[in-house]
């Protein structure tokens, strides 16, 4: 769906800070079927880069990692050139006409976001000049990925400031996040996994605290709404997947090795029954509140 967001401890899905921000966005073919003509763009995975310290070596390593992770892909598409710091490395690779072919008009630029990366200078024995450092002090998914919605807001605002007129409208996708919920029914067919009873749309998962999947959604929706209020042209925040994956990859395993579901609806591996998770109910309420954007 073309929206998402983070913490059910605050205002609910009809909070004007969310609904009013989204209501005035221009019609987009990926969101509004009534919009005329096709919409063609791309989607790249981007991440904010945070230096491990203010030391000049860590800052320089972070700048290089940012060029390789972010600018290497987006600058040829938006500016028709590779990052200045990387151009000497590409002289034997780039052929005449490549950049003209790569730089084509885009109706939108897709940004897939998961979390920021903390980068420091690598040790002398490392084959590369940087290393990823552990990002502490934030909640995590059951795959160990930090949940930092404010980093998405920061990156979107920086993205617009850096590329300005070269930047087409944005489509943001929040990467799936695995969470192992408290079990209400044992999954007889899948050791270590769980299914859910039909919880209500109150953003809880039956435990004492807020549902972490819902909190993650609301937090990122608020981050995008803030970026929009500050002038970033974001046409949609896509979340998903709708259903649990049939088979989990290694990154979907929780700390104890259990199968960590990622869908907005739980899928029973035995009979295929689909049960909406609290995040599904919350998201449905958010979408249902968008009356002004639907005309």
Image (cartoon, grey):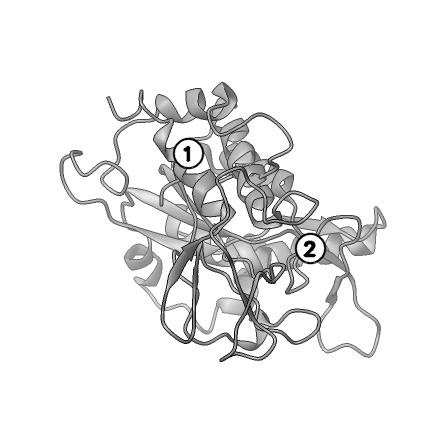
Crowding near the residue tagged with mark 1, few <14, some 14–19, many ≥20 C-alpha atoms within 10 Å = some
The numbered dot on residue 198 is none
Q: CA distance from mark 2 to mark 1?
A: 25 Å
Q: Residue at x 64, y 43 (%)?
A: 210
Residue 95 spot, x, y in % from top left: 36, 68
Depicted 154 relative to depicted 187: above or below: above
Quarter of the view holding residue 169: top left
Residue 70 spot, x, y in % from top left: 54, 54
Q: Residue at x 14, y 35 (%)?
A: 36
Crowding near the residue tagged with mark 2, few <14, some 14–19, many ≥20 C-alpha atoms within 10 Å = some
Which residue is under mark 1? 285
- Is 201 situated left or right of 154 in this image? left
Which residue is under mark 2? 140
Quarter of the view holding residue 3: top left
- Is 123 situated left or right of 82 in this image? right
Q: Residue at x 52, y 30 (%)?
A: 227
Indicate the quadrant containing the C terminus: top left, top right, bottom left or bottom right: top left
Give 268 or 89, whichever is nearer the viewer. 268
Residue 276 spot, x, y in % from top left: 43, 52
Indicate the quadrant containing the N terminus: top left, top right, bottom left or bottom right: top left
Residue 104 spot, x, y in % from top left: 28, 50
Label 2 vs 1, first from the N-terminus: 2
Quarter of the view holding residue 148: top right
- Is 207 situated left or right of 108 in this image? right
Depicted 11 relative to depicted 168: above or below: above
């Amino acid at each position: 769906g073309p929206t998402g967001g983070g913490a059910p401890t605050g205002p609910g899905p009809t909070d004007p800070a969310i609904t009013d921000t989204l209501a005035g966005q221009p019609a987009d073919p990926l969101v509004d079927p009534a919009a005329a003509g096709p919409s063609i763009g791309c989607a790249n995975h981007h991440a904010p880069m945070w230096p491990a310290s203010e030391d000049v070596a860590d800052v320089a390593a972070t700048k290089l990692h940012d060029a390789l992770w972010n600018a290497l892909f987006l600058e040829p598409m938006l500016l028709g050139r590779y990052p200045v710091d990387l151009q000497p490395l590409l002289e034997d690779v780039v052929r005449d006409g490549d950049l003209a072919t790569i730089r084509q008009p885009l109706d939108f630029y897709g940004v897939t976001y998961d979390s920021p990366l903390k980068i420091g200078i690598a040790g002398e024995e490392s084959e590369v000049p940087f290393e990823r450092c552990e990002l502490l002090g934030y909640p995590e998914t059951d795959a160990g990925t930090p949940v930092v919605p404010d980093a998405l807001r920061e990156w979107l605002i920086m993205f617009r400031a850096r590329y300005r007129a070269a930047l087409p409208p944005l489509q943001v996708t929040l990467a799936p996040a695995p969470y192992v919920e408290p079990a209400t029914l044992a999954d007889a067919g899948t050791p270590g996994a769980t299914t859910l009873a039909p919880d209500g749309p109150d953003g809880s998962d039956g435990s004492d605290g807020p549902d972490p999947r819902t909190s993650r959604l609301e937090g990122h929706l608020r981050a995008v709404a803030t970026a929009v209020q500050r002038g970033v042209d974001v046409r949609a925040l896509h979340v998903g997947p709708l259903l649990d994956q049939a088979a989990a990859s290694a990154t979907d395993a929780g700390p104890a090795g259990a199968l960590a579901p990622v869908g907005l609806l739980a899928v029973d591996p035995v009979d295929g029954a689909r049960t909406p998770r609290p995040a599904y109910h919350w998201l449905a309420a958010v979408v249902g509140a968008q009356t002004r954007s639907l005309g």
